[in-house]
Image (tube, rainbow, N blue to C red):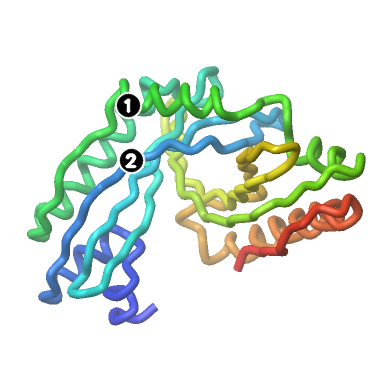
Amino acid sequence: MGQENLFQHPSRISDLVMAKRHGLEVTCQPHFDVIPVNFLHRENPFQAYVFLCKFEGKVGEREYSFRKCYARGCPHNLCPHVSQAVMIANRYLQRDYRKLRDAGIDVQERLFTLEEMLVKFDEHKETQDPTLTIDDYINIAKEGNKVSVNINLEYVPAVEHFANYDNSQTFLVVEFNVESLGRTHTLQRCFACYQTDKEAEQKPGQVQVANARLEELYRSFDEAGIEYEKRFFA
C-alpha cells in the first residue's frame, strides 16, 4: 500500500503518525466497545470478550475510522478476567497515546474503565441467548420458518497473554445478524486465525481455511432455505 493511500485510508496508529510527520493535519477521537467472540481452546469452545477502541477523525480533509483490539476478557480461566483485561488494555492504549502525543497529534486520552466494561459485558450476556447457535437457526429454517442472515467479516487483532509471554494473533471473525421468529440475534464465530507477526506466510493459508469453512456453512444455508448473501475473506 502506497504512502498516499495510507494517508487517505489509515488503518493503524503508525499510519496516523506517518501522516502527521508528512505535514498533514490529523485529528483523533477514541471510542470504546466490547464484542463477544467464540474461540476454541484445545477443542473446547468458549466465549471471550474482545476490548476494542475505534479511532475516528480526519487526515487532512478525509475522514477515517479503524478499530484496534487491546485485550480480551472472560469469566473463566481460559483468558484474563474482565478486570485484568481492563488493566492490560489500558497499558497498550497508553503506549499508543504516547505515540500520537509524540507526533504532535491531539487526542482525548480516555481509558477503559472497569465499571464501563462490566456494564457492556453484562449487556452482552443479557442480550445474547447462549442456547442458540447458527446450527440451531439452520434447524429452525428446515422446520419451515423464515430465517434471514446478514453476514459481516472482520479481521480482529488480539494479544493472548500467557504466564511468561504474549502472543499476537489475528482472528478471522464472522458476525451473523439473524432474523427469525420475530427476533434479531447477533452471533459471532472465529473461523481461523494466524500469528500477526507472520502474516505474510500464514494469512493466505488461513484465509483459505476460513473460506472453506464458510463454503460448507453456506451449503447448509442453501439446503435449509436461509436467505443470505455469500461473503468470503479476501
Residue 86: quadrant of the picture: top left
Residue 210: quadrant of the picture: bottom right
Q: Which badge, 1 or 2, comes first in the chain's sequence?
A: 2
Q: CA distance from mark 1 to mark 2?
A: 9 Å
Q: Are marks 1 and 2 in contact (CB under 8 Å)?
A: yes
Residue 92: quadrant of the picture: top left
Residue shown at 34% from the left, 60% from the top = 65
Q: Which mark is residue 32?
A: 2
Badge 2: residue crowd in 10 Å (few <14, some 14–19, many ≥20): some
Residue 105 vs 4, above or below: the answer is above
In-image side of 49 versus 68 (left or right): right
* Residue 84 spot, x, y in % from top left: 37, 22
| Closest to the observer, 86 or 219 | 219
Furthest residue in direction front, as rendered: 182
Residue shown at 88% from the left, 50% from the top = 224
Residue shown at 26% from the left, 41% from the top = 93
Q: Which mark is residue 116?
A: 1
**Where's the N terminus, which quadrant?**
bottom left
